[in-house]
Image: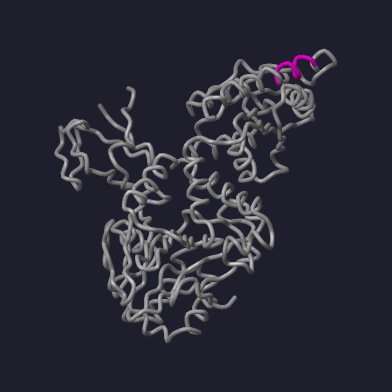
Amino acid sequence: MKAVEIKPDIYWVGAIDWAVRDFHGYVTPSGTTYNNYLILDDDITLVDTVKFDFGDVAASNIISLVDPSKIKNVIVNHIENDHMGSLRRIMNLAKNATIYTTEKGKAGMARFFDISKWDIKTVKTGHELKTGKYTLMFIETPMLHWPDSMVTYVKEAHLLISQDAFGQHYASTERFDDDFIASASEAELEDAVIDYYANILMPFGKLIKAKIGEIKKLGIPVDMIAPDHGFIWRKNPGKVMDMYLNMAGGKTNLRIVIIYDTMWHGTEIMTQPVVQGIKDEGVACKVIKLRATPMSVAIKEFWNSRGCLIGSPTLNNEVYPSVAEFIMHLRGLRPSDRIMGAFGCYGWSGGAVKWLYNEFKGMKLEEVGPGLEINFRPVQEDDKKCYDFGREFARKVKEFHKKYE
Amino acid sequence: MKYECEMCGYIYDPEVGDADGGIAPGTPFEDIPDDWVCPVCGVGKDSFSPVEE
Protein backbone atom coordinates (compact mmCIF):
# COMPACT_ATOMS: atom_id res chain seq x y z
CA MET A 1 0.00 0.00 0.00
CA LYS A 2 1.13 3.55 -0.67
CA ALA A 3 2.75 5.86 1.86
CA VAL A 4 0.31 7.62 4.19
CA GLU A 5 0.90 10.99 5.88
CA ILE A 6 0.17 10.62 9.60
CA LYS A 7 1.39 14.04 10.80
CA PRO A 8 2.66 16.99 8.73
CA ASP A 9 5.61 15.62 6.73
CA ILE A 10 5.66 12.36 8.71
CA TYR A 11 4.70 9.33 6.63
CA TRP A 12 3.91 5.67 7.20
CA VAL A 13 6.08 3.84 4.65
CA GLY A 14 5.58 0.24 5.77
CA ALA A 15 4.17 -2.99 4.37
CA ILE A 16 1.15 -5.21 4.91
CA ASP A 17 1.68 -8.93 5.45
CA TRP A 18 -1.74 -10.40 4.67
CA ALA A 19 -0.52 -14.01 4.50
CA VAL A 20 1.58 -14.60 7.61
CA ARG A 21 -0.05 -17.07 10.02
CA ASP A 22 3.00 -18.32 11.90
CA PHE A 23 4.84 -15.45 13.54
CA HIS A 24 7.81 -17.19 15.18
CA GLY A 25 5.38 -19.72 16.62
CA TYR A 26 2.45 -17.41 17.36
CA VAL A 27 -0.57 -17.75 15.21
CA THR A 28 -1.54 -14.50 13.51
CA PRO A 29 -4.95 -15.24 12.01
CA SER A 30 -5.26 -11.72 10.64
CA GLY A 31 -1.71 -11.39 9.34
CA THR A 32 0.23 -8.34 10.44
CA THR A 33 1.85 -5.14 9.24
CA TYR A 34 5.40 -3.88 9.50
CA ASN A 35 5.15 -0.17 10.13
CA ASN A 36 8.00 2.24 9.74
CA TYR A 37 7.97 6.00 9.43
CA LEU A 38 9.72 8.61 7.30
CA ILE A 39 10.16 12.16 8.54
CA LEU A 40 10.59 14.60 5.65
CA ASP A 41 12.35 17.32 7.55
CA ASP A 42 15.59 19.22 6.83
CA ASP A 43 17.38 16.02 7.89
CA ILE A 44 15.39 13.18 6.32
CA THR A 45 14.88 10.58 9.04
CA LEU A 46 13.66 6.99 8.81
CA VAL A 47 12.31 5.39 11.99
CA ASP A 48 12.66 1.60 11.95
CA THR A 49 12.67 -0.72 8.93
CA VAL A 50 10.54 -3.74 7.98
CA LYS A 51 10.94 -7.51 7.86
CA PHE A 52 13.48 -8.46 5.17
CA ASP A 53 10.93 -10.07 2.82
CA PHE A 54 9.11 -6.76 2.58
CA GLY A 55 12.16 -4.58 2.04
CA ASP A 56 11.17 -3.78 -1.55
CA VAL A 57 7.72 -2.59 -0.51
CA ALA A 58 9.04 -0.22 2.13
CA ALA A 59 11.85 0.95 -0.15
CA SER A 60 9.41 1.81 -2.90
CA ASN A 61 7.24 3.75 -0.43
CA ILE A 62 10.30 5.70 0.69
CA ILE A 63 11.40 6.29 -2.93
CA SER A 64 7.92 7.63 -3.78
CA LEU A 65 8.61 10.45 -1.32
CA VAL A 66 12.32 11.13 -1.45
CA ASP A 67 15.62 10.12 -3.04
CA PRO A 68 16.74 7.59 -0.38
CA SER A 69 20.37 8.62 -0.65
CA LYS A 70 19.24 11.79 1.12
CA ILE A 71 18.24 9.93 4.29
CA LYS A 72 20.37 11.49 7.02
CA ASN A 73 19.24 9.50 10.08
CA VAL A 74 17.98 5.97 10.62
CA ILE A 75 16.50 5.28 14.04
CA VAL A 76 16.55 1.66 15.19
CA ASN A 77 14.09 1.36 18.09
CA HIS A 78 14.32 -2.42 18.23
CA ILE A 79 16.65 -4.99 16.66
CA GLU A 80 14.20 -7.89 16.20
CA ASN A 81 14.05 -9.25 12.63
CA ASP A 82 10.59 -7.88 11.85
CA HIS A 83 11.83 -4.36 12.67
CA MET A 84 15.49 -4.35 11.62
CA GLY A 85 15.39 -6.94 8.83
CA SER A 86 15.79 -4.44 6.00
CA LEU A 87 18.47 -2.28 7.61
CA ARG A 88 21.26 -3.35 5.29
CA ARG A 89 19.06 -2.67 2.28
CA ILE A 90 18.29 0.79 3.62
CA MET A 91 21.95 1.51 4.44
CA ASN A 92 22.88 0.51 0.88
CA LEU A 93 20.45 3.14 -0.37
CA ALA A 94 21.36 5.71 2.30
CA LYS A 95 25.12 5.38 2.37
CA ASN A 96 25.73 8.49 4.47
CA ALA A 97 23.06 7.92 7.08
CA THR A 98 23.78 7.85 10.80
CA ILE A 99 22.08 5.14 12.83
CA TYR A 100 20.69 5.93 16.29
CA THR A 101 20.02 3.06 18.66
CA THR A 102 20.66 1.98 22.26
CA GLU A 103 23.95 0.52 23.48
CA LYS A 104 22.43 -2.96 23.61
CA GLY A 105 20.91 -2.25 20.20
CA LYS A 106 24.35 -1.60 18.70
CA ALA A 107 25.86 -4.67 20.33
CA GLY A 108 23.01 -6.86 19.11
CA MET A 109 23.03 -5.31 15.63
CA ALA A 110 26.59 -6.58 15.17
CA ARG A 111 25.25 -10.14 15.43
CA PHE A 112 22.92 -9.57 12.47
CA PHE A 113 25.00 -7.35 10.17
CA ASP A 114 28.55 -6.28 9.43
CA ILE A 115 28.33 -2.85 11.04
CA SER A 116 31.99 -1.91 10.57
CA LYS A 117 31.27 0.69 7.85
CA TRP A 118 28.20 2.20 9.47
CA ASP A 119 28.12 5.36 11.56
CA ILE A 120 26.22 4.32 14.68
CA LYS A 121 25.48 6.60 17.62
CA THR A 122 24.20 5.07 20.84
CA VAL A 123 21.61 6.99 22.83
CA LYS A 124 20.09 7.01 26.31
CA THR A 125 16.73 8.24 27.62
CA GLY A 126 16.39 11.98 27.07
CA HIS A 127 18.78 12.20 24.14
CA GLU A 128 17.41 14.65 21.61
CA LEU A 129 17.97 14.73 17.85
CA LYS A 130 16.92 17.79 15.91
CA THR A 131 15.85 17.05 12.34
CA GLY A 132 14.72 20.59 11.42
CA LYS A 133 11.28 21.67 12.52
CA TYR A 134 11.02 18.45 14.52
CA THR A 135 12.98 17.26 17.55
CA LEU A 136 13.13 13.54 18.32
CA MET A 137 13.53 12.40 21.90
CA PHE A 138 14.50 8.81 22.68
CA ILE A 139 13.21 6.91 25.70
CA GLU A 140 14.87 3.62 26.59
CA THR A 141 12.39 0.85 27.40
CA PRO A 142 14.56 -2.10 28.50
CA MET A 143 12.64 -5.39 28.43
CA LEU A 144 9.64 -3.81 26.67
CA HIS A 145 10.16 -6.22 25.31
CA TRP A 146 13.93 -6.77 24.63
CA PRO A 147 17.02 -5.35 26.30
CA ASP A 148 17.73 -3.13 23.26
CA SER A 149 14.23 -1.62 23.06
CA MET A 150 13.53 2.10 23.00
CA VAL A 151 10.78 4.38 21.70
CA THR A 152 10.98 7.68 19.79
CA TYR A 153 8.92 10.73 20.72
CA VAL A 154 8.54 13.47 18.09
CA LYS A 155 8.10 16.48 20.33
CA GLU A 156 6.46 19.06 18.08
CA ALA A 157 4.13 16.42 16.60
CA HIS A 158 3.11 14.96 20.00
CA LEU A 159 3.75 11.63 18.32
CA LEU A 160 5.09 8.53 20.08
CA ILE A 161 6.62 5.96 17.73
CA SER A 162 6.39 3.00 20.05
CA GLN A 163 7.90 -0.02 18.22
CA ASP A 164 6.12 -3.12 19.58
CA ALA A 165 4.34 -1.44 22.49
CA PHE A 166 0.65 -0.77 21.83
CA GLY A 167 0.82 -2.72 18.56
CA GLN A 168 -1.37 -5.45 17.12
CA HIS A 169 -0.87 -8.18 14.54
CA TYR A 170 -3.60 -7.18 12.13
CA ALA A 171 -3.31 -6.67 8.39
CA SER A 172 -5.76 -4.13 7.01
CA THR A 173 -6.18 -1.42 4.41
CA GLU A 174 -6.96 0.89 7.33
CA ARG A 175 -4.05 2.60 9.07
CA PHE A 176 -5.82 4.27 11.99
CA ASP A 177 -7.81 3.12 15.01
CA ASP A 178 -10.94 5.13 14.18
CA ASP A 179 -11.02 4.00 10.54
CA PHE A 180 -10.69 0.36 11.54
CA ILE A 181 -13.36 0.65 14.24
CA ALA A 182 -15.70 2.21 11.68
CA SER A 183 -15.06 -0.55 9.12
CA ALA A 184 -14.95 -3.46 11.59
CA SER A 185 -15.45 -3.08 15.34
CA GLU A 186 -13.87 -1.84 18.55
CA ALA A 187 -14.11 -5.38 19.95
CA GLU A 188 -11.87 -6.73 17.18
CA LEU A 189 -9.30 -4.03 17.83
CA GLU A 190 -9.36 -4.69 21.59
CA ASP A 191 -9.01 -8.42 20.98
CA ALA A 192 -5.90 -7.84 18.86
CA VAL A 193 -4.39 -5.62 21.58
CA ILE A 194 -5.08 -8.25 24.26
CA ASP A 195 -3.74 -11.11 22.09
CA TYR A 196 -0.50 -9.21 21.58
CA TYR A 197 -0.12 -8.25 25.25
CA ALA A 198 -0.90 -11.76 26.51
CA ASN A 199 1.58 -13.52 24.27
CA ILE A 200 4.45 -11.05 24.32
CA LEU A 201 4.18 -8.56 27.17
CA MET A 202 2.62 -10.59 29.98
CA PRO A 203 5.86 -10.90 32.01
CA PHE A 204 6.52 -7.17 31.97
CA GLY A 205 3.49 -5.66 33.71
CA LYS A 206 5.64 -4.06 36.41
CA LEU A 207 7.86 -2.40 33.78
CA ILE A 208 4.81 -1.27 31.78
CA LYS A 209 3.29 0.48 34.78
CA ALA A 210 6.63 2.15 35.55
CA LYS A 211 7.28 3.22 31.96
CA ILE A 212 3.81 4.68 31.36
CA GLY A 213 4.19 6.46 34.71
CA GLU A 214 7.59 7.80 33.61
CA ILE A 215 6.14 9.09 30.32
CA LYS A 216 3.24 10.78 32.13
CA LYS A 217 5.70 12.33 34.59
CA LEU A 218 7.73 13.76 31.70
CA GLY A 219 4.61 15.77 30.97
CA ILE A 220 4.98 15.20 27.23
CA PRO A 221 1.68 15.45 25.39
CA VAL A 222 0.92 12.41 23.26
CA ASP A 223 -1.96 12.71 20.83
CA MET A 224 -0.88 9.91 18.52
CA ILE A 225 0.82 6.56 19.12
CA ALA A 226 2.34 4.87 16.06
CA PRO A 227 3.41 1.30 16.78
CA ASP A 228 5.43 -0.91 14.42
CA HIS A 229 2.50 -3.33 13.92
CA GLY A 230 -1.15 -2.74 13.23
CA PHE A 231 -3.21 0.40 13.70
CA ILE A 232 -1.97 3.85 14.60
CA TRP A 233 -3.77 5.31 17.61
CA ARG A 234 -4.93 8.63 16.21
CA LYS A 235 -8.39 9.05 17.72
CA ASN A 236 -7.83 7.48 21.11
CA PRO A 237 -4.22 6.84 22.17
CA GLY A 238 -5.36 7.07 25.80
CA LYS A 239 -7.47 3.96 25.30
CA VAL A 240 -4.57 1.61 24.57
CA MET A 241 -2.51 3.10 27.42
CA ASP A 242 -5.44 2.48 29.78
CA MET A 243 -5.85 -1.08 28.48
CA TYR A 244 -2.16 -1.71 29.17
CA LEU A 245 -2.34 -0.19 32.66
CA ASN A 246 -5.43 -2.27 33.45
CA MET A 247 -3.86 -5.51 32.27
CA ALA A 248 -0.57 -4.73 34.03
CA GLY A 249 -2.59 -3.98 37.17
CA GLY A 250 -4.19 -7.42 37.13
CA LYS A 251 -7.61 -6.53 35.72
CA THR A 252 -9.42 -9.18 33.70
CA ASN A 253 -12.91 -10.61 33.18
CA LEU A 254 -14.78 -12.61 35.79
CA ARG A 255 -14.61 -15.65 33.56
CA ILE A 256 -13.20 -19.17 33.64
CA VAL A 257 -11.34 -20.95 30.88
CA ILE A 258 -10.87 -24.70 30.76
CA ILE A 259 -7.77 -25.68 28.82
CA TYR A 260 -7.53 -29.40 28.26
CA ASP A 261 -6.41 -32.28 26.13
CA THR A 262 -7.63 -35.85 26.06
CA MET A 263 -6.65 -39.26 24.76
CA TRP A 264 -9.80 -41.40 24.74
CA HIS A 265 -12.26 -38.57 25.57
CA GLY A 266 -12.34 -39.34 29.31
CA THR A 267 -10.92 -35.97 30.38
CA GLU A 268 -13.06 -34.33 27.70
CA ILE A 269 -16.25 -35.93 29.04
CA MET A 270 -15.35 -34.60 32.51
CA THR A 271 -15.39 -31.03 31.18
CA GLN A 272 -19.12 -31.12 30.46
CA PRO A 273 -20.51 -31.35 34.02
CA VAL A 274 -17.61 -29.11 35.20
CA VAL A 275 -18.79 -26.40 32.79
CA GLN A 276 -22.41 -26.84 33.95
CA GLY A 277 -21.32 -26.42 37.58
CA ILE A 278 -19.43 -23.24 36.68
CA LYS A 279 -22.38 -21.86 34.74
CA ASP A 280 -24.87 -22.67 37.51
CA GLU A 281 -22.64 -20.73 39.90
CA GLY A 282 -23.12 -17.73 37.58
CA VAL A 283 -19.74 -17.53 35.88
CA ALA A 284 -19.19 -17.63 32.11
CA CYS A 285 -16.84 -20.32 30.89
CA LYS A 286 -14.91 -21.06 27.73
CA VAL A 287 -13.46 -24.46 26.82
CA ILE A 288 -10.28 -24.77 24.80
CA LYS A 289 -9.13 -28.09 23.42
CA LEU A 290 -5.38 -28.19 22.87
CA ARG A 291 -4.15 -29.70 19.55
CA ALA A 292 -7.31 -28.17 18.06
CA THR A 293 -6.41 -24.67 19.17
CA PRO A 294 -3.18 -22.75 18.67
CA MET A 295 -1.14 -22.18 21.83
CA SER A 296 -1.27 -18.41 21.40
CA VAL A 297 -5.09 -18.51 21.41
CA ALA A 298 -5.07 -20.62 24.58
CA ILE A 299 -2.72 -18.07 26.18
CA LYS A 300 -4.99 -15.19 25.15
CA GLU A 301 -8.04 -16.93 26.64
CA PHE A 302 -6.08 -17.64 29.83
CA TRP A 303 -5.25 -13.96 30.03
CA ASN A 304 -8.89 -12.99 29.39
CA SER A 305 -10.09 -15.03 32.39
CA ARG A 306 -9.74 -14.75 36.14
CA GLY A 307 -9.78 -18.52 36.66
CA CYS A 308 -8.26 -21.39 34.68
CA LEU A 309 -8.81 -25.12 34.97
CA ILE A 310 -6.32 -27.38 33.25
CA GLY A 311 -7.53 -30.82 32.18
CA SER A 312 -4.95 -33.48 31.40
CA PRO A 313 -4.79 -37.24 31.07
CA THR A 314 -1.71 -39.00 32.41
CA LEU A 315 0.61 -40.54 29.80
CA ASN A 316 3.51 -42.68 31.04
CA ASN A 317 3.19 -41.10 34.50
CA GLU A 318 3.62 -37.64 32.98
CA VAL A 319 1.27 -34.82 32.15
CA TYR A 320 0.05 -35.00 28.57
CA PRO A 321 2.68 -33.35 26.31
CA SER A 322 0.45 -30.69 24.74
CA VAL A 323 -0.55 -29.62 28.24
CA ALA A 324 3.14 -29.48 29.18
CA GLU A 325 3.70 -27.27 26.13
CA PHE A 326 0.95 -24.90 27.28
CA ILE A 327 2.38 -24.79 30.80
CA MET A 328 5.87 -24.15 29.39
CA HIS A 329 4.56 -21.15 27.43
CA LEU A 330 2.75 -19.95 30.55
CA ARG A 331 5.79 -20.32 32.80
CA GLY A 332 7.83 -18.12 30.49
CA LEU A 333 5.09 -15.51 30.49
CA ARG A 334 5.18 -15.30 34.32
CA PRO A 335 1.41 -14.94 34.89
CA SER A 336 -0.08 -13.38 38.00
CA ASP A 337 -3.51 -12.46 39.40
CA ARG A 338 -5.14 -15.69 38.25
CA ILE A 339 -6.50 -18.69 40.13
CA MET A 340 -5.87 -22.26 38.94
CA GLY A 341 -7.15 -25.81 39.28
CA ALA A 342 -6.60 -29.14 37.55
CA PHE A 343 -8.44 -32.33 36.72
CA GLY A 344 -8.16 -35.36 34.45
CA CYS A 345 -8.51 -39.08 33.91
CA TYR A 346 -5.76 -41.59 34.65
CA GLY A 347 -5.25 -45.31 34.18
CA TRP A 348 -3.22 -46.56 37.16
CA SER A 349 -0.59 -44.38 38.89
CA GLY A 350 -1.78 -40.98 37.71
CA GLY A 351 0.59 -38.03 37.97
CA ALA A 352 -0.70 -35.30 35.67
CA VAL A 353 -2.83 -33.46 38.22
CA LYS A 354 -0.09 -33.57 40.88
CA TRP A 355 2.43 -32.23 38.36
CA LEU A 356 0.08 -29.40 37.47
CA TYR A 357 -0.43 -28.27 41.07
CA ASN A 358 3.34 -28.30 41.46
CA GLU A 359 3.60 -26.02 38.43
CA PHE A 360 0.97 -23.67 39.86
CA LYS A 361 3.08 -23.43 43.05
CA GLY A 362 6.20 -22.79 41.00
CA MET A 363 4.42 -19.95 39.17
CA LYS A 364 3.18 -18.61 42.54
CA LEU A 365 -0.42 -18.65 41.32
CA GLU A 366 -3.45 -18.98 43.59
CA GLU A 367 -4.92 -22.44 43.35
CA VAL A 368 -7.93 -24.47 44.36
CA GLY A 369 -6.76 -27.96 45.32
CA PRO A 370 -6.52 -30.88 45.38
CA GLY A 371 -8.04 -31.24 41.92
CA LEU A 372 -10.19 -34.05 40.58
CA GLU A 373 -8.97 -37.35 39.16
CA ILE A 374 -11.10 -40.08 37.69
CA ASN A 375 -10.04 -43.62 36.84
CA PHE A 376 -10.17 -44.37 33.10
CA ARG A 377 -13.43 -42.59 32.31
CA PRO A 378 -16.31 -40.92 34.16
CA VAL A 379 -19.21 -43.19 35.10
CA GLN A 380 -22.68 -41.95 36.07
CA GLU A 381 -21.75 -41.15 39.71
CA ASP A 382 -18.81 -39.02 38.57
CA ASP A 383 -21.18 -36.51 36.98
CA LYS A 384 -21.96 -35.01 40.38
CA LYS A 385 -18.29 -35.02 41.44
CA CYS A 386 -17.36 -33.04 38.30
CA TYR A 387 -20.33 -30.69 38.64
CA ASP A 388 -19.47 -29.95 42.30
CA PHE A 389 -15.80 -29.46 41.37
CA GLY A 390 -16.78 -26.88 38.74
CA ARG A 391 -19.22 -25.13 41.05
CA GLU A 392 -16.74 -24.94 43.93
CA PHE A 393 -14.03 -23.60 41.61
CA ALA A 394 -16.37 -20.91 40.30
CA ARG A 395 -17.21 -19.92 43.89
CA LYS A 396 -13.52 -19.50 44.66
CA VAL A 397 -12.95 -17.53 41.46
CA LYS A 398 -15.75 -15.08 42.37
CA GLU A 399 -14.22 -14.65 45.83
CA PHE A 400 -10.74 -14.10 44.39
CA HIS A 401 -12.03 -11.65 41.79
CA LYS A 402 -13.38 -9.31 44.48
CA LYS A 403 -9.92 -7.94 45.23
CA TYR A 404 -9.67 -6.62 41.66
CA GLU A 405 -12.89 -4.69 41.60
CA MET B 1 22.84 -13.21 49.39
CA LYS B 2 22.37 -13.62 45.67
CA TYR B 3 19.68 -11.64 43.85
CA GLU B 4 17.87 -12.66 40.66
CA CYS B 5 16.60 -10.31 37.96
CA GLU B 6 12.86 -11.05 37.62
CA MET B 7 12.88 -9.94 34.00
CA CYS B 8 15.75 -11.93 32.50
CA GLY B 9 17.04 -14.37 35.12
CA TYR B 10 20.50 -12.81 35.59
CA ILE B 11 21.86 -13.64 39.03
CA TYR B 12 23.84 -11.03 40.92
CA ASP B 13 26.44 -12.80 43.03
CA PRO B 14 27.93 -10.46 45.66
CA GLU B 15 31.16 -12.49 45.65
CA VAL B 16 31.60 -11.69 41.94
CA GLY B 17 30.20 -8.17 41.74
CA ASP B 18 29.61 -6.57 38.30
CA ALA B 19 32.85 -5.23 36.86
CA ASP B 20 31.29 -3.53 33.77
CA GLY B 21 28.77 -1.86 36.03
CA GLY B 22 31.47 -0.62 38.45
CA ILE B 23 30.47 -2.91 41.29
CA ALA B 24 33.44 -4.50 43.07
CA PRO B 25 33.40 -8.15 44.20
CA GLY B 26 32.24 -8.41 47.76
CA THR B 27 29.54 -5.73 47.36
CA PRO B 28 26.25 -6.80 48.93
CA PHE B 29 23.21 -6.11 46.73
CA GLU B 30 21.82 -3.58 49.22
CA ASP B 31 24.97 -1.45 48.84
CA ILE B 32 24.73 -1.18 45.05
CA PRO B 33 23.76 2.39 44.01
CA ASP B 34 20.11 2.92 43.05
CA ASP B 35 20.92 3.88 39.47
CA TRP B 36 22.61 0.55 38.72
CA VAL B 37 20.88 -1.63 36.12
CA CYS B 38 20.90 -5.33 35.29
CA PRO B 39 23.92 -5.89 33.03
CA VAL B 40 22.02 -8.33 30.82
CA CYS B 41 18.70 -6.63 30.24
CA GLY B 42 18.95 -3.10 31.64
CA VAL B 43 16.13 -3.06 34.19
CA GLY B 44 16.51 -1.38 37.56
CA LYS B 45 17.28 -2.75 41.04
CA ASP B 46 13.57 -2.82 41.87
CA SER B 47 13.14 -5.78 39.51
CA PHE B 48 15.49 -7.96 41.58
CA SER B 49 14.46 -10.48 44.24
CA PRO B 50 16.57 -12.37 46.76
CA VAL B 51 17.38 -15.95 45.80
CA GLU B 52 16.19 -18.37 48.45
CA GLU B 53 19.01 -20.82 49.09
Instruction: Please tell me whether residue A401 is drawn above or below residue A105 in the rendered image.
Output: above
* Front one among A341 and A242: A242
* Front one among A7 and A29: A7
Could you tell me which quadrant the N terminus of chain A lies in?
bottom right
Q: Is residue B14 magenta?
A: no
Residue at 33 percent across and 39 percent down: it is B10
* Front one among A301 and A245: A245
Residue at 21 percent across and 39 percent down: it is B34
Q: Residue furthest top?
A: A381
Residue at 48 percent across and 74 percent down: it is A11
Instruction: Please tell me whether residue A211 is drawn above or below residue A52 in the rendered image.
Output: above
Q: Is residue A388 magenta?
A: yes
Left-right relation of B4 to A86: left
| Residue A135 on image: x %, y % | 31, 69
Main secondary structure of the magenta stretch: helix
| Residue A119 on image: x %, y % | 27, 73
Picture quadrant where residue A180 is located: bottom right
Picture quadrant where residue B36 is located: top left
| Residue A273 on image: x %, y % | 78, 23
Could you tell me which quadrant the C terminus of chain A lies in?
top right
Report the colour scheme: one colour
Q: Residue furthest bottom?
A: A67
Instruction: Please tell me whether residue A192 is drawn above or below residue A106 in the rendered image.
Output: above
| Residue A391 on image: x %, y % | 71, 19
**Which stretch is magenta?**
A384-390
Instruction: Please tell me whether residue A72 is drawn above or below residue B18 in the rendered image.
Output: below
